[in-house]
């Protein structure tokens, strides 16, 4: 765990460069296939009572129109 914290705090680490390398690796792998399936998880979780929500940390809300 300490190693992960050191990695995150390292000023020489660029999160965007890490993400970009992952995107590029995905593109390279995708080019080897004629058909790709894009799957999406639309699972919704509802926690009751509301007091448990505070224990979950940051929870992003999405609303469909």
Image (cartoon, rainbow, N blue to C red):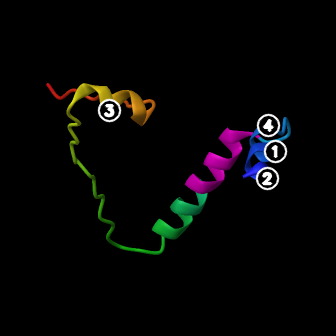
What's the CA distance linking mark 4 and mark 3? 31 Å
Q: Secondary structure at mark 3?
A: helix
Disc 2, disc 1: CB below 8 Å? yes
Residue 6's disc is: 1
User: In this picture, is 11 found above or below 31?
Assistant: above
Residue 5 place in picture, x, y as percent: 75, 44
What's the CA distance linking mark 3 and mark 1? 31 Å
The residue tagged 3 is 52
Q: Secondary structure at mark 4?
A: helix
Disc 4, disc 1: CB below 8 Å? yes
Please state the extent of the stretch shown in magenta in the rendering: 14-23
Residue 3's disc is: 2
Residue 9's disc is: 4
What's the CA distance linking mark 2 and mark 3? 31 Å
Disc 2, disc 3: CB below 8 Å? no
The total of numbered circles placed on residues is: 4
Residue 45 place in picture, x, y as percent: 23, 42
Q: Residue at image x 66%, y 39%?
A: 16
């Amino acid at each position: 765990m300490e190693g992960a914290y050191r990695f995150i705090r390292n000023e020489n680490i660029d999160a965007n460069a890490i993400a970009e390398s992952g995107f590029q690796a995905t593109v390279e792998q995708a080019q080897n296939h004629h058909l790709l399936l894009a799957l999406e998880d639309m699972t919704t979780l509802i926690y009751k009572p509301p007091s448990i929500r505070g224990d979950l940390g940051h929870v992003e809300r999405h609303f469909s129109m």
